[in-house]
Every structure is written in structure tokens, then in C-alpha cells.
Image: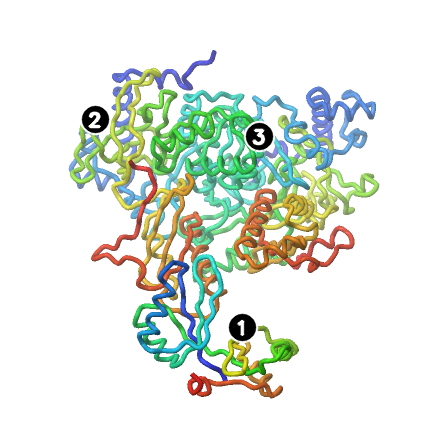
Amino acid sequence: MTIVQLSIFIENRSGTLIKVLEVLKDAQIQIIASTIADTAEYGIYRLICSEPQRACEELKRAGVPVSLSNVFALELDNQPGCAAEAIATFSRAHISISYMYSFLLGDKGILVFRTDNAEQARQTILENHLRYISEPDLSCLA
Amino acid sequence: MIYNPNKECMSRDEMSALQGKRLHKIVEYVYYNVPFYRNKLQNLDIRPDDIQTIEDITKLPFTTKKDLRDNYPFGLQAAPQSEIIRVHASSGTTGNPTIVGYTRKDIGVWSECMARCLTAYGVTRDDIFSVAYGYGLFTGGLGAHYGVEHMGASVIPTGTGNTEKHLKLIRDLGVTGIACTPSYALYLAETMDKMGIKKEDIRLKVGAFGAEPWTEQMRQEIEVRLGLKGYNIYGLSEIMGPSVSYECQEQNGSHINEDHFFPEIINPTTLEPLPLGQTGELVFTTLPKEGMPLLRYRTRDLCSLMPGQCNCGRTNIRMGRIEGRSDDMLIIRGINVFPSQVESVILSIPEFAPHYMLIVDRERNLDTLLVQAELRQEVFTSTFDTPAAVDALEKKLASRLKSVLSIAAKVQLKAPGSIQRSQGKSAHVIDNRKL
Amino acid sequence: MSSPYFNPERETMTRAQIEAFQLERLKETVRHCLTNPFYQKKFKEAGITADDIQTLADVRKLPFTTKNDLRETYPFGMSCVPLKDCVRLHSSSGTTGNPTVILHTKKDLDEWANQVARNLWMVGLRPDDVFQNSSGYGMFTGGLGFQYGAERLGMLTVPAAAGNSLRQIKFIKDFGTTAIHAVPSYVTRLYEVMQEQGVDPRRDTKLRVLAIGAEPHSEEQRQRIEQMMGVKAYNSFGMSEMCGPGVGFECPEQNGLHFWEDYYIVEIVNPETLQPVPDGEIGELVLTTLCREAMPLLRYRTRDLTRVLGRSCPCGRNHIRLDRMRGRSDDMMVLRGVNIFPIQIEKILMQFPELGNNYLITLTTDQDNDNMTVEVELAEMFTDDYGRLQQLGKDITRALKDEILLTPRVKLVPRGTLPVSEGKAVRVVDKRKVYQ
């Protein structure tokens, strides 16, 4: 029910981001979505890509601190109000969201988020018949 | 053991006579040396000669923290500056701290009072005593320190912080006594557990605990976990510092050094004296004090004076536990904090709206203070997207609070309108500690 | 006109008088030391007895004492009086290995206060001065040492302790503070905050004397401080093993520090050969205490590097003059008056499983503030949670602060970013302009 995300420790220094991107380029890995926020000294560069396991190994080999984590990805219609509806469902279930980002895949909006209460999130998604994507969906789309 | 039987075991008549004589002297002294008191006394048409016995004390005017603030910094000082060798400071209700000057003789008296207290706890010259109160302007550290040295035990000027090293020293040096806040004593016990030090590994036998209110249950817990006897010590910098009163081994009320500090209990509303045994506001008059003598200083602490004689042989009157305050002062990690101080800081930074909340808690036996402050709408709008600006504001508030309160507070900036509007003064404080 | 000397008799002794005084005190000190098994053993090993000390030069026959000796005899092995005669104990910072413990009798404290009072008097302070002691209290000897000395002199003493600059400045103005003792980097910090507050030290304060010490600083730094604050800044030398501050101090001539030879025998030795070096040449400072009861020390290796400048001075004092400290003969760092060994930091870092083995300590002077940055490599990217990374940084900072009593800047960096040198890794980069 979840997809695999790479979390990369990024120092706020010139050259660090390009190093990561070049490793992925050389490994022929495609980035589907990514996000990084402005921070003082370091940040976490999170990305969704094809072949996350291999990407992780390649990055580790290059000495980049990286970890894999599972995040939820909801598929939404590309219409006003869809995100609000989805989040309201989680809010009602008292599930708090640590971070969230989104991207377009074909004509669908994909909402990626992470919560500390994964079990309850899983249940909420099932009970409310929300559409989600899992890792296999992603790799065949990529 | 009694350190100074001549002063701690007098008959009531002898004590009253001594107090009366000293009261006359102190009134005469302030009349001629402190314009503030001279004016006050003249307004009441009192001449020093009108004060002959200790009973005459009720004729005298009260002194309040506000008087100290209005006369900041040295207005109430009686001795010339060249005679003052030390100042201490405690929190004022707003930006100005309360300043107390001590002459060499005052420091000597204080050290003796401290030595009486330590002797009452059973401390001797063979003991090694760790002073874990804060050193510096706060009277706890240097006050206890000079007392231990004065009576000839070894003092370790531990100060605050670095608990693990402190415990290592307690164990390795065979430390037998400790002075700290009761909550810090519990924190020590907890850290001992964490470090795997058992109470059999240490030799603590006496604890001088004060600077914050504590309960009998806390005493029992501390005594069991540290394997020592815990005694109350009471004091306030305006009067002297720690050792204004102290428990003896009976652990039943704190003996007041009443040859130096004359106690009264009054009704905080009517200001009328209350009979022995009744709870009211504690008032002190410093008897022979040179630096900053005070007449009938209202401590705002609520307690009672205890009738009857103590089994230890001391005849000095005892006071009960502090049962509360007649103002909104908080005691956090032994430091006095007034909500109005926080308010004055918040009002001094234009980015903040005048809405704030103090949240006091106790986590693992350490007091914490969280100050929430609301940003003004226009500031909030212009800064919420720039974490650095919010960071800078947070730091600014934290550093100003630290400078005024003398303790670190955690700071939380809040969006406009998110703090509950206060209805009455205590609505600015949420105290989650259970005492 | 009061005398320029706090203790005229002692301060103005001729060289011959100083040396005669020292010889007598040295013999006494050696006899006193020999009541202690540690020294008995050392003397036996060196094949000497108290009778071998006949001239002042015989001090060189005595064995050296090191910080390691203090650690190995921890806690009370070097005490030469019964514990009940001790009234004070100071201990070095840190939890790494055994700390060092220094004991004092009432008389030791009394003499210590006299030494500090002598220094303060020497630079023109008198009982009507207001002395603000802005150095740390507690175990750090700069606090209580100056407190007792200033009280001994009879000044109004404000135990402001370190930090809280806004309040410090408020007190300087409100109390009419005329003298401050602080570590040099803190003085510059105070000045910065004064500027932010629109306070001009020349116009708005009564400051006239600064005592700075406990932290290495260059002549240029001193001059800058003097220009900023518009007052004279005098260099103070002390170390807890000797008592604390008060061991050496500059006089108004500011031509080196007078080390009080009625309290100490001063030697400068080559740290490798341990042989004396000629006057003017840099070597390690070695001190022998002459007046201490609780813990006398023979030929204590301070690890501080300095040189002899002279033995006379226009101020009328003939006590030896030494140059400001030029460095260390070990890897100890001195930051804001606190002594720190890299091993202390390493030990703390290694307690965090999230961290790798590489770290780098950088000391810098930023706008005249001495700062420490500790860069440390992450072992793994152990979390996807930014909050946890931040918390780790905070936890490391907190643990380091508990150990070294200073708050360093902690920077988490990816593995492989820090230089790994062959053999002994470079752990400390000191970019401060101190020893130049």
C-alpha cells in the first residue's frame, strides 16, 4: 500500500546536490518526484524514483547518507478540492501528517505523505476507499 | 550540637529584651542613614526613641518589594558604598532586579547563621559538603558556600549543571552533605539510577534543601533514594539569603535566627498581626544589619509561626512550611519568577502582541518554563515563510527572557489570536506541577 | 595618596631578599611534602632527601610533578594535611578519566585572596571601586578567586558570573562599575551587545580597569579590547593547580606578567629535555608552590609555553616578569577560560551510535568571540524525520556542554566529508589569532 522513498542527508553547501543527481544519472535512474525545503545547515532531500533499492545502493556506494522509507501515495483526480477532501478524512481520524508533497502522473495528482501512525492511516485509506498507488504501480509507470 | 547556644537557646525574656534593644538601634540607624525610612517614619510621626521594646514594632511601617524597586539600585542602602563589599540580586517584579548590598560584617553574620544551620543538621568539620545551588548573584551558592567554609567543613563549589560529574565526585570523594533544591535532589537520584550508582555507594548523610516549596512526601522520597536526612532551609535575599531559618534534627518546623531576623505573621489584606499558630504572610525585620536593613519586609510567603518548644533544645521560634504566596510569584528551579517580568519583556519587543502564556511543568524532576508569545498580525504575515526570521525572533525573546528572569525559558511563537485572552491575572500562568 | 603596593614589604623585595625568602620557604615546603607518601616515594626514586636542598638552584634536583600525578592520586592522594583541615575543594571540568582535585585550607584561601587583592591593587583598584566579576563561578576558580580577592581589597563586588550580557551592561551602568574581570572573548562580546544597545563604554560607564585572563590572547587582541572599551586591560594568569587566578598579573607598565615569587619558584624548561632554557627563550613554565598547606606542588609542569622577560620593572617590583602565554606543550585547548582536551569531545561523540568516527574541532574568532565548531560525520542516514536529526544535533550539543561547560556549534556532515589523515588524525584546527 505504500511506496518507497529515498531520504538523503544534504548539507547546505554548494556541490552536494549535484553529487547526488550525478550518481543517479550515471546509474540511469529516473526521478519521478522530489522535494527539499530551505534549511539552515542541512536538510533532507526526499525523492521518489525508479528502482529505489538500486538507487539507494548506488548512493551508499558513493558515500551519500541515504535511507529508504515507506510513504503513502494517494491518487487523486486533478480537480479543485480533491486534496482537501482526502486530508479531511485523515484529520477526522486524528492522523497527523509529518510532511507531504505532490506531483502529477499522467492526468492524476499523486499526494505523497508520511505519518507516524501508519497502521491507522492504512485502515483509514481502506475504510474510506481512497485510491492509492503501491510500488509496482509506480515502477510500471516510470 | 548547637553552634551558638548563647543565641540559639535564650529564654523568651532574654530574646525579647535583645530584640527590643536591637530594634531600637536599627530604627535609629535607618532614621539617620536611609532617607526613605526617615521620610516614612517622619510621616508617621515616629522618632527612634519611640521604639524601645520589640512590641513597639507594630508602630513601624511595612516595606514591600515595590519599595525596593522604586529605590533601585542603592536607595535603601544604609552603609556608605565603600563599606559594601558585595551585592546580590533577585528578581524584581519587572525589569529591575532587587539589589541587596552587604558589608563585611553582614557577610560574617550570614556565615554564622549558615554555620548554625549546618550544625543543626549535624554537619561537622569532618564533612565534605557540595554546594549545588547556582553561584553568582543568586544568594544560594555563595551564601551556603561561605557558611560551610566558616564552620570549617570542606566545601565543593559544584554550582549547577553537569550532574554526572557531580555524582562521580559525590561517590569518589565521599561527599557527606549537599545543598540544592529538593527537585534537584530527586533529579540526582534519578541520574544515579541511570548511571548505576546505588545509594550504598555514596556517603551522603545530610541535605540542605530549599529555595523552592516542597512537601513531606518529597522529603520521604529523597531520604529513601539518597539515603540521607533532608532538612529544610529557608531564606530570601532581601533579608539575607539562605539560613534565615532552618530545621533541626527534629524535622518539625524551621528555627528562625530571630536574634537577626524578627518574624511576624500578618493578615495580608488587613495587615493586622495574627496570633501564634495561624497562617498568614511572613514579615521580617532585620535586626543588626548594616548594608541594607529592612523594617517589616513583607515576604509574600504564607506560613505560620509554631507555638511550643522544640525537643532539640533550641528556643528560637519555628516557622512551618511555606503554604503559598500572597502574590503571583512562581518559583522555578529555585528562581523567583513573576509573570509581570515576562510581560515587560514581551512588551519591549515590538514584533509581539501583548498576549502571552507561561506554562510551568516538571519533567523528570526538573522544572521547565515555556513562554508562548503571540506575533502581531503584520509580523506574522511577513515572517512565516522565512524560518530564519522566526528563528531570530525566537532567539531574541529567549535571550531577553534569560537576561531578565535569570533562567532559560523555552519559547514558542504563536499565530495571532491563538492564545486564549486572559480574564484576570492568573490566567497568564498554567502550572502543571503537582505540589 | 595610598601606597601603590598592597603588601609593600613583599612586593618591593630586592632580588637577594626574594631569593633568601624562597630558599627558606622551599626547604619548608619540601619538608611539608615529605609528610605525604606520594612525595616520599618520588624522592626515594630520585635518590634525594630534604637535606639535598641547600641552595635555590637545588630546586632542579627535585622531581617534576604532572597533571597525570594528580589524576593517579585522585582524589586525596596528594593532600599534605588531614581532610578536616581542608575547607575547599576545586575539581577540573569533565568526566573523562579521573578529574583533578585541588584542596585548600583556610590559610590557603587566605593567601589566595591576598594574591588576588595584591594584583587588583597593583592596577589601581581601591576599596571605593565597584568590581564586577563576570567570570564563571563554582568549580571554575576565576569566580571565587576574584570574589575573595576583591572582597579582601574591600571593593563592592558584584558576582555577576558569566553570560547574560544585557544584565551585565545594566549593572555596569546602574552600579557605576569601575572594573570588570572576564575572559577576553567575553569582553568583546559585551562590547558588541553594548553597541547593539547604544551604550558607549566611554560615555555611559565609569569603567576604568579590565582584568582579562584564563584564555590565551594576543597583544593585538588586548589592544583592540582597550580601544573598544576605552580602558586599560591587564593580563591575568592563574591555574587551579596553583590556587587559581592570582599567580601572575601585569602591572600598569604592561610589560609582561609579574609572577609572585614569594608564592612560587618559577622555572622555564625545554619541554623535551626538561633542562632550563636561557632567559628570553620560550619554554614550558614550571612552578613550585612555596606557601601552600593543603596541596603543595613541586616543579609542577604547567604545559604553558612562555619566556622570561626580566627581573626588574619601573613599577618597583622585582618579581620575575614573564611573557604572555605563547602556546601549549600538549593538545589542551583553552576556550573562554575553559580547558578542553580533544579526548573529552571524542568520548562524548562516541556515545552516539548515529555518529561515525570522524570529527573535526575548529576554533575560530568570529567578531572577537572565540567559538568552537564540532563537525561530526553521520554513520548512517538513520531517519527520514527532520525533527529527529535536529534533536540529535541538540542532544550532542547538550552532552558536549555537560562535559566541557561550553556550548559548541555542532554540525552534522555526511560521511566522508571530513579529512582523514594518516595515523594521528587532525582533530583540531585553531584558526584564532592568538599565538602569532
Q: Is residue C330 left or right of residue A97?
A: left
Q: Earlier in the sequence, mark 3 or mark 2?
A: 3
Q: Are marks 1 and 3 in contact (CB under 8 Å)?
A: no
Q: Which mark is residue C279?
A: 2
Q: Position of residue C300 (x, y in %)?
A: 27, 37
CA distance separating discs 3 and 2 = 44 Å
Disc 3 vs disc 2: which is toward the camera? 3
Q: Residue furthest front?
A: A107
Q: Secondary structure at mark 3?
A: helix
Q: How is the image coloured?
A: rainbow
Query: Residue at point 36% right, 25% down?
Result: C250
Q: Position of residue B306 (x, y in %)?
A: 73, 45
Residue B170 appearing in the image: no
Q: Position of residue C247 (x, y in %)?
A: 35, 30
Q: Which mark is residue A100?
A: 1
Disc 2 vs disc 1: which is toward the camera? 1
Q: Are marks 2 and 1 in contact (CB under 8 Å)?
A: no
Q: Is residue B14 left or right of residue C205?
A: right
Q: Residue furthest top?
A: C1
Residue hosting label 3: C173
Q: Amino acid at mark 2?
A: Asp
Query: Residue at point 39% right, 34% down?
Result: C213
* Picture layout, residue A90 above or below residue C117: below
Q: Secondary structure at mark 1?
A: strand
Say if labels 2 and 1 share a chain. no
Disc 1 vs disc 3: which is toward the camera? 1
Query: Residue at point 71% right, 19% down?
Result: B32
Q: Say which of C177 and C384 sits in front.
A: C384
Q: Position of residue C347 (x, y in %)?
A: 35, 57
For label 2, the crowd category at 10 Å Cα-Cα, with few meaning under 14, some 14 to 19 and many 20 or more, is some
